């Protein structure tokens, strides 16, 4: 199993971010080939010292790193990546890795 983590920074307009993210970006990302599950944080993202600067974390699950690579290089993946410029102006970090339950 492998996961892709998209970590979005605090937007200037959270309501506008949410509107675009959930009505446009999520449906687009859900077309990624091989996507097994899609989770997002709800409410404030908390750190050890309190509220964190991160606004939202999305966790997308795939069968493997190869599956993530194939998804992201597909037309759907290219469209999803290009769409980030339409709403994630505060910044987004995208990370991925093999995962296992321990």
Image (tube, rainbow, N blue to C red):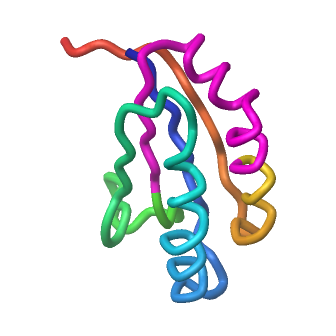
82 w.r.t. 63: above or below? below
Residue in the image at 76% along x and 49% along y? 79
Q: Quadrant of the N terminus?
A: top left
Dominant SS in magenta? helix
Which residues lie in the magenta part?
Answer: 57-80
Magenta highlight on residue 76: yes
How many labels, in total?
0
| Picture layout, residue 4 above or below residue 80 | above
Is 70 on the left or on the right of 49, as rendered? right
Q: Is residue 102 left or right of residue 32?
A: left
Residue drawn at 49 percent across, 27 percent down: 34
How far across and how far down the image is residue 80, in percent? Answer: 69, 50
- The relative height of residue 19 versus residue 46 in the rendered view (above or below) is below
Q: Does the magenta portion include 29? A: no
Q: Position of residue 64 (x, y in %)?
A: 48, 13
In the image, what residue occupies the spot 42% across and 16% down? 63
Q: In the figure, is residue 51 to the left or right of 24?
A: left
Specify the farthest residue to the left: 102
- Asked which quadrant contains residue 9, the reply is bottom right
Q: Nearer the viewer, residue 68 or 93?
A: 68
Where does the image place residue 54, in percent across and percent down from the top left? 51, 61
What residue is shown at x 59% (from left), y 63% (from top)?
25
| Quarter of the image with the C terminus in it | top left
């Amino acid at each position: 199993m492998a996961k892709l983590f998209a970590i979005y920074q605090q937007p200037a307009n959270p309501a506008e971010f949410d509107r675009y993210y959930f009505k446009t970006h999520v449906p687009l990302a859900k077309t990624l080939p091989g996507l097994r599950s899609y989770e997002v944080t709800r409410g404030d993202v908390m750190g050890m010292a309190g509220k964190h600067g991160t606004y939202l974390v999305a966790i997308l699950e795939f069968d493997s790193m190869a599956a993530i690579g194939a998804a992201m290089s597909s037309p759907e993946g290219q469209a999803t990546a290009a769409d980030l410029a339409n709403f994630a102006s505060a910044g987004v970090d995208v990370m991925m890795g093999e995962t296992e339950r321990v």
